[in-house]
């Protein structure tokens, strides 16, 4: 039974009642049901499916080896695309459902899980599921692979396939990937002239720093919008943002939407709401209505407001700022051998894995450093210690380098006249205003035992102070956040309470990490309580 079939019956009843002079009955509860069905369908909210591209490669690799065709994972991109297109055109089944269970030597547990997910999709009623999002998408074959696996599983109406471009390299390569798809007749024949692309704000910022990531996201959306127009594709973006600035969030939703690249929204805006932001923005009817009002007003304003694109001088400046900030960020996060030990000892990151506070494991892989850590615990850990490092690291060095050069006036003009750039800098300023290096120093004092890691902590706080000076110089503000009376008032009210929670949390972590009390349930409860309190106190933590 589909939504359209139910709707046809309800409309037939409505017409019949109206034709027999029963309009009052027809326009009562029946009309309400018709409206609800039109808005929500039979399933209230369609769910998306999301999986990493490597899992699809692993599943197809097992299939091709089972069929004696060789290793799909070892093929080059051209060979993969050619084979995928052949299979999509032939529509011949690759493997019978359940056959993978008879060959455990070829089909690993994760490959079986992936294939059974597609079987599950085929069993769902139409409208139950929306999109299939591919995490860590890098190539056109990643998209065609999901389309083929859906067809092979017998999905009657395949879910729209949405590549998610996350890292800096993925964003830079997105245009090439999508152009390959738009010039592939087999693919174009399945999408009906419509394409959705997800932009990852969290992992790109974790990869390259906030400033470099925000510019890459801006340029990628511009380029993809132009590309879609060239190939007559109706393109919509799905913005994978979190509540924190480090994950693409902005508490000023209206301003944030208008800061997107011109002609990339066009009346269609899809975005994630995560963590505490769900309750903050949608926790009750009045709040949800207000949030939807803001989104609607912003999307309409963006559609009706003419916003010029940045000129070539500004683009060149953004590339310069991005390169400097990215190098400075990676020099600390990737290039300094002291960083990982410092991060794991100075924040509650290690303890997150033992607490039931997330929807997914804190790491994509059990082993590995920061690169294997998911963006949410990466941001969340620094938010807990009030250092907020991922948001500002690299920004100060980039801004100060330009301010010390003969291009300082050009940078000040950009801040004054270009709304998108001003929004980015103002967000960094807001985060700096919320940060408390003295609180972070207390974590170092109690938790960091390695002397080299302690030295890094001092260096990071020195960089924080230099970033404050650079941002204040650019904005010509006398103090951080001086243009937001509400922010300053909120900080004055809540900081005394959050400060106490931070002190208690640092001491709790010290005791938990002591061998004598590592299994103390009371300490675990205390840690969880402090995490919740600090998250609510800081705000924008989703």
Image: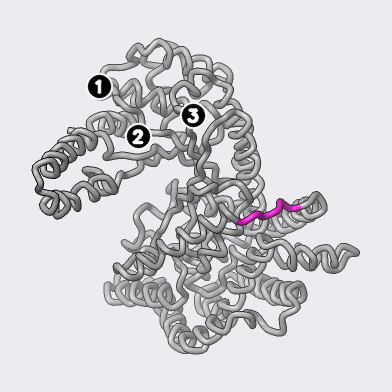
- Asked if residue 125 lies left or right of residue 454, the reply is left
Query: Residue 498's image quarter?
Result: bottom left
Mark 1 surroundings: few (<14), some (14-19) or many (≥20) residues within 10 A: some
- Earlier along the polypeptide chain: callout 1 or callout 2? 1
Residue with the mark numbered 2: 110
- Residue 307 magenta-drawn? yes
Please state the extent of the stretch shown in magenta in the rendering.
305-310
Q: State whether residue 238 is above or below residue 232.
A: below
Q: Quadrant of the N terminus?
A: top left
Q: Main secondary structure of the magenta part?
A: loop
Q: Position of residue 129 (x, y in %)?
A: 31, 39
- Earlier along the polypeptide chain: callout 1 or callout 3? 1
- Marks 3 & 2, CB-CB < 8 Å contact: no
C-alpha separation, residue under disc 1 versus residue under disc 2: 16 Å
Q: Residue at x 30, y 34 (%)?
A: 117
- Marks 1 & 2, CB-CB < 8 Å contact: no
Q: State whether residue 433 is above or below residue 115.
A: below
Query: Residue 191's image quarter?
Result: top left
C-alpha separation, residue under disc 3 versus residue under disc 2: 33 Å
Residue with the mark numbered 3: 193
Residue with the mark numbered 1: 97
Label 3: which secondary element: loop
């Amino acid at each position: 039974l589909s939504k359209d079939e139910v709707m046809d019956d309800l409309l037939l009843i409505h017409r019949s009642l109206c034709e027999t002079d029963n309009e009052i009955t027809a326009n009562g509860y029946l009309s309400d049901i018709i409206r609800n069905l039109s808005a929500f369908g039979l399933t209230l909210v369609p769910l998306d499916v999301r999986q990493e591209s490597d899992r699809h490669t692993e599943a197809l690799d097992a299939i091709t080896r089972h069929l004696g065709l060789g290793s799909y994972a070892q093929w080059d991109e051209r060979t993969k695309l050619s084979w995928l297109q052949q299979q999509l055109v032939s529509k011949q089944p690759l493997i019978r459902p359940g056959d993978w269970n008879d060959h455990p030597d070829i089909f690993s547990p994760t490959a079986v899980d992936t294939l059974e997910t597609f079987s599950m999709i085929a069993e769902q009623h139409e409208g139950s599921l929306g999109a299939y999002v591919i995490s860590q998408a890098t190539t056109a074959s990643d998209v065609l692979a999901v389309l083929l696996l859906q067809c092979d599983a017998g999905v009657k109406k395949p879910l729209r396939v949405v590549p998610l471009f996350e890292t800096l390299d993925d964003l830079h390569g997105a245009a090439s990937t999508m152009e390959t798809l738009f010039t592939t007749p087999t693919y174009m024949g399945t999408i009906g002239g419509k394409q959705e692309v997800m932009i990852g704000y969290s992992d790109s910022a974790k990869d390259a720093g906030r400033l470099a990531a925000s510019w890459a996201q801006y340029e990628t959306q511009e380029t993809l919008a132009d590309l879609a127009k060239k190939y007559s594709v109706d393109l919509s973006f799905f913005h994978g943002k979190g509540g924190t600035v480090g994950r693409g969030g902005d508490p000023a939703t209206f301003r944030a939407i208008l800061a997107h690249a011109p002609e990339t929204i066009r009346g269609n805006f899809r975005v994630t709401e995560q963590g505490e932001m769900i309750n903050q923005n949608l926790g009750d009817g009045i709040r949800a209505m207000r949030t939807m009002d803001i989104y609607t007003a912003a999307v309409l304003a963006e559609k009706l407001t003419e916003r010029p694109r940045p000129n070539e001088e500004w683009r060149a400046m953004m590339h310069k700022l991005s390169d400097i900030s990215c190098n400075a960020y990676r020099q600390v996060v990737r290039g300094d051998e002291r960083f990982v030990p410092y991060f794991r000892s100075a924040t509650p990151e290690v303890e997150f894995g033992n607490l039931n506070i997330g929807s997914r494991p804190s790491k994509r892989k059990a082993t590995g450093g920061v690169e294997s850590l998911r963006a949410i615990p990466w941001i969340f850990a620094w938010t807990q210690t009030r250092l907020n490092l991922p948001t500002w690291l690299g920004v100060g060095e980039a801004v100060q380098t330009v301010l010390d050069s003969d291009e300082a006036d050009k940078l000040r003009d950009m801040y004054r006249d270009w709304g998108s750039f001003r929004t980015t800098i103002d967000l960094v300023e807001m985060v700096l205003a919320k940060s408390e290096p003295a609180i972070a120093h207390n974590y170092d004092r109690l938790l960091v035992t390695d002397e080299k890691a302690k030295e890094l902590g001092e260096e990071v706080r020195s960089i924080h102070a230099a970033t404050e000076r650079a941002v204040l110089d650019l904005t010509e503000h006398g103090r951080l956040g001086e243009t937001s009376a509400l922010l300053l008032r909120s900080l004055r009210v809540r900081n005394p309470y959050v400060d106490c929670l931070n002190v208690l949390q640092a001491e709790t972590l010290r005791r938990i990490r002591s061998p004598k009390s590592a299994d103390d349930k009371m300490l675990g409860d205390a840690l969880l309580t402090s995490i919740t309190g600090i998250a609510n106190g800081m705000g924008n933590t989703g």
